[in-house]
Image (cartoon, rainbow, N blue to C red):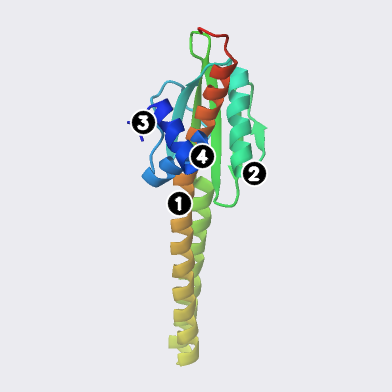
Amino acid sequence: MAQLSDEELREAAAEAGISPHELRHALAQRDGTALDRPEADTGLVESTQRGEADTVVEGRVRQAPNAALAAVRASIERQTGRSGHRQGEDEVDIVDDSIGLNYRMKTRDDGGSGALVRVELDTTSGRSFRNLAATGTVGATLVFLGLAMLIGSWTLGVVGLGIGGLGAWVVLQRTAKLARGLVSARAVASQALSEADDAAAKALPPGR
């Protein structure tokens, strides 16, 4: 996708009967990588320092910082169906409880007439839920197997093995869902930054 110009992207989207933004999103999900614009974790904006980010997407938006942050926030809210919350003057969080992922956004002036926006993707809550499920599964399995050995009950042994198998399946499904969610969230963040910058560019006077 990085080899496609804006014009080629528009032509390809028109042929597919979708918008350029939808095509960007689909390509980003397919590749599992950030879009060519914005760039991934360039370090242009310092971390929010409110958690551990699994991955970062950054980009420039040709608007004032507050307006750029509002535009990126609105796009992510629209794409995810989740509402954001202010975390100070230049930061916003959007939590997607369905996958246990937090979009943390931060902006600063780019030194010119625009802004730099950083989107951190943090799956700490999703990983915590998965780890808790794994711990519970192991604990319940050991209890049932221990009781089965203590009283010589094959039934309890079978129940214990069943709990272990079911719990392992749940943990694996949760892990896969979290991985897919992170790839999708990266595409969402990339699309939000691209949409915000595209909208800002269209609003600029001709020649700027």
Using the numbered discs, state the Cα–Cα distance from disc 1 to disc 4 in whole angstroms: 18 Å
Q: Which residue is mark 2?
A: 81
Label 1 crowd (10 A; few <14 / some 14-19 / many >=20): some
Pointers 4 and 2 in contact (C-beta within 8 Å)? no
Of callouts 4 and 2, the N-terminal one: 4
Q: Which mark is residue 146?
A: none
Q: Is residue 151 visible?
A: yes
Q: Position of residue 14 (x, y in %)?
A: 48, 37
In the image, what residue type sits under mark 2? Gly
Label 4 crowd (10 A; few <14 / some 14-19 / many >=20): few
Q: Which mark is residue 22?
A: 4
Q: Give the secondary structure at mark 2.
A: loop
Q: Give the secondary structure at mark 1.
A: helix
Pointers 1 and 2 in contact (C-beta within 8 Å)? no
Direction from residue 204 to residue 150 in the image, left or right: left
In the image, what residue type sits under mark 3? Leu
- Marks 3 and 1: which is nearer the front? 3
Q: Which residue is mark 3?
A: 4
Using the numbered discs, state the Cα–Cα distance from disc 1 to disc 2 in whole angstroms: 17 Å
Q: Residue at x 38, y 25 (%)?
A: 42
Q: Which residue is mark 1?
A: 180
Residues 121 and 10: in front is 10
Label 2 crowd (10 A; few <14 / some 14-19 / many >=20): few
Q: Is residue 115 above or below residue 94?
A: above
Of callouts 1 and 2, the N-terminal one: 2
Pointers 3 and 2 in contact (C-beta within 8 Å)? no
